[in-house]
């Protein structure tokens, strides 16, 4: 049962890591778990799982770009409630309007370009 759970944790690792180290991790587990117990290996595999996904740069790009794309709409939803009774001139001079109108699109476009360039380089390296 523990071996099956360990295999599942290995399967949850990023594909490149799993292809490179998955068989070796399973072999070490099978050899050493008899003497040392399987709990330590399972905890180590779970720690490795978190570390590999956290250190994988491709994991962070999509959520950051999505956040940048949603940010203007969230701010636009906040602005009418905050400045609904004010005239247009005071809304345009508000600091939140600068955030929505200038900063959020700039961040979104910048993150999109970074993602596109990184993806292009990744695809070129794989060829």
Image: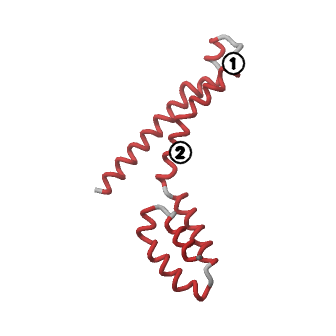
State the residue at coordinates (52%, 86%).
31
State the residue at coordinates (62%, 83%).
37
Q: Which residue is mark 2?
A: 63
Residue 27 in the image: x percent, y percent?
Answer: 47, 81
* In front: label 2 or label 1: 2
Residue 73 in the image: x percent, y percent?
Answer: 57, 29
Q: Which quarter of the image is occupied by the N terminus?
A: bottom right
Residue 110 in the image: x percent, y percent?
Answer: 46, 37
Q: Secondary structure at mark 1?
A: helix
Q: Is residue 55 above or below residue 30?
A: above
* Circles 2, 1 touching at the beta carbon (< 8 Å): no
Q: Which quarter of the image is occupied by the C terminus?
A: bottom left
Q: Secondary structure at mark 2?
A: helix
Q: Quadrant of residue 81?
A: top right
Q: Is residue 74 shown left or right of residue 81?
A: left
State the residue at coordinates (53%, 43%).
64
**Residue sitting at the far bottom:** 35
Coloring scheme used: secondary structure
Mark 1 neighbour density, 10 Å: few (under 14) some (14–19) many (20 or more): some
Mark 2 neighbour density, 10 Å: few (under 14) some (14–19) many (20 or more): few
Please give the count of numbered marks on the rendered protein.
2
Q: Which residue is mark 1?
A: 83
Q: Quadrant of residue 20?
A: bottom left
**Residue sitting at the far front:** 1
| Residue 38: mark | none
Q: Is residue 85 shown left or right of residue 41?
A: right
Mark 2 or 1, nearer chain start: 2
Residue 93 in the image: x percent, y percent?
Answer: 63, 18
Toward the viewer: 105 or 73? 73
Q: Is residue 123 above or below residue 48?
A: above
């Amino acid at each position: 049962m523990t071996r099956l759970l360990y295999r599942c944790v290995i399967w949850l690792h990023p594909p490149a890591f799993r292809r490179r180290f998955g068989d070796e991790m399973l072999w070490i587990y099978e050899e050493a778990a008899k003497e040392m117990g399987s709990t330590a290996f399972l905890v180590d595999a779970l720690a490795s799982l978190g570390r590999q996904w956290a250190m994988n740069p491709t994991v962070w790009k999509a959520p950051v770009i999505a956040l940048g794309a949603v940010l203007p709409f969230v701010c636009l939803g906040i602005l009418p409630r905050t400045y609904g009774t004010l005239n247009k001139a005071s809304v345009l001079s508000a600091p939140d309007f600068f955030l929505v109108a200038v900063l959020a699109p700039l961040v979104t476009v910048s993150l999109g370009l970074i993602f596109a360039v990184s993806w292009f380089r990744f695809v070129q390296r794989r060829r």
